[in-house]
Amino acid sequence: MKVVYRRYYTIISTLFTMARDKTAAVVGGYGGMGKIFAALLAQEGFNVTISGPSETKGGKVAGELEVTYERDNINAVSHADVTIISVPIDKTVSVIAEVGPALKKGSLLMDVTSIKQLPCKTMEEHCPKGVEILGTHPIFGPRVNKVDGQVFVLTPIREGKWSRLFIDILKKHKVRVHATSPETHDEVMAVVQGLTHFTYISLAKTLHELSFDIKDSRNYSSPVYEMMLDMVGRIIGQDPHLYAEIQMRNPKIPRVHKAFLKASKTLSEIVGKGDEKAFVSFMVEAAKHFDDVERAMGRSDKAIESLVAELKLIKGSVGRELLLEHIYSGKKHLGVVEDVSPDEVLLLEGGGKKNLKLSNIRVLGGGEKKSFKIEKFGAVARDFSILIDSPADEDFISKLLMQYDDRIISVNVKDVYEGKQLPEGKKSVCFGIEIINEDAKDADAGVSDFFEKLGGVRR
């Protein structure tokens, strides 16, 4: 037996050491994207170090994430199993050249930039042999707080155990992973990002040149127009330096711009001539090339219906308690809905009133609401001894009680007694009930009312 115990102890100790010794460095780890990856790797059991020149920002974020801050990039990466470069596009190449030679053999180097050819080439040039290289492009911005359910494009250069582990972590978080070459990535992203951003920024500037009253136009708008304005606002409301880098660093984008301007000019000339036949032909040709028009119709209908449904839910909740979450900050607001306008909801929260923009919040469901209230108010245990008919099913009654009042956390049957001391055909059941400690007295009264409606008598 001692041999067996020693064997298990050795295995457990080895696993613990492996988990404890997984190290990661995120260069630029106090920036928006850097924080996401530092938090992800810390969550996955890595000892994480973030680095960068700002000690104030670095120290603050390190404290928030419970990781280590190191000002010197070389010191941060030299012992790391996984190194992620998360700096602005224009600094990525120079940072790779700086830290690449310091990486240990068998470790992994990754970047998270929106272009892939130049960073991947630079990583190959400056990393020692034996260092794994994985180009990555998370297809989301720093306003997204976590990777769950997002899209990652990967451009593997040198694969190994750490790159495979990272991919496994992404899949664990239900990330949609797509692998391709750096060249193909840049060609596709020239349209996915380059054309999309170029179009939306141009549209916003057009509205500016027209001195167009965007706010007033919403009084005339369809849901599609509203969605378009929201997408334009989403792009132009973010870091213009980042979008400039995306437009100017991808060598494939100029060809896309040229094609777009040519098509726009052609369409404008057709409209100017009043040539309806040519317009119809132009639009039909574009539709034929489109991936799946019906799918696009369905997805856009679904998006519109989702927005309308949530607004309808909030409007129908006046006088009721809701838990609302700010979609960017993650802050939760629990209160009673007093009023709803087309743009805002007025919430009675903690003795005060709070106006929240409908565009910035989502309604959390019953399970999330209950968890929030348990964390906020705590819980209290109560025992209810009830005299009920002997044929009654106490387990079924427990399930009914859970559905009767959302302040009830759990119900357990602690004891069932059937004896001579009780009236014939009756039994005494003790229910152990855990209640959210928000208004326990009122909840007690609610539970008693439930049992009375079933014909039970509290003992």
Image (tube, rainbow, N blue to C red):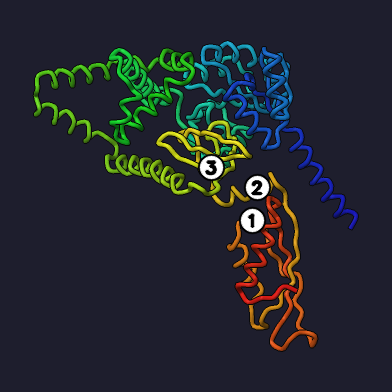
Q: Quadrant of the N terminus?
A: bottom right
**Mark 1 touches mark 3? (CB < 8 Å):** no
Q: In the shown orientation, is residue 100 left or right of residue 256?
A: right
Q: Is residue 63 above or below residue 395?
A: above
Q: At x 53% / y 28%, what residue is drawn? A: 143
Picture quadrant of residue 101:
top right
Residue indicated by mark 3: 174
Where does the image place residue 235, in percent across and percent down from the top left?
Answer: 42, 23
Q: At x 70% / y 33%, what residue is drawn? A: 46
User: Dot 3 lies on which element?
Assistant: loop
How far apart are the two marked residues, 1 and 2, measured between alpha carbons?
A: 9 Å
Q: Quadrant of the C terminus?
A: bottom right
Point out the tag, 2 or 3, that comes first from the N-terminus.
3
Q: Is residue 72 above or below residue 142?
A: above
User: Dot 1 lies on which element?
Assistant: loop
How far apart are the two marked residues, 2 and 3, measured between alpha carbons?
A: 28 Å
Residue indicated by mark 2: 373
Where does the image place residue 212, in percent across and percent down from the top left?
Answer: 30, 18
Picture quadrant of residue 267:
top left
Q: In the shown orientation, is residue 395 left or right of residue 364?
A: right
Amino acid under label 1? Arg
User: Dot 2 lies on which element?
Assistant: helix
Amino acid under label 3? Lys
Mark 1 Cα-neighbour bin, 10 Å: few <14, some 14–19, many ≥20: many
Q: In the shown orientation, is residue 80 left or right of residue 324?
A: right
Amino acid under label 2? Lys
How far apart are the two marked residues, 1 and 3, measured between alpha carbons?
A: 32 Å
Residue indicated by mark 1: 407
Q: At x 75% / y 69%, what residue is drawn? A: 414
Where does the image place residue 398, in percent across and percent down from the top left?
Answer: 65, 68
Where does the image place residue 447, in percent across and percent down from the top left?
Answer: 66, 64
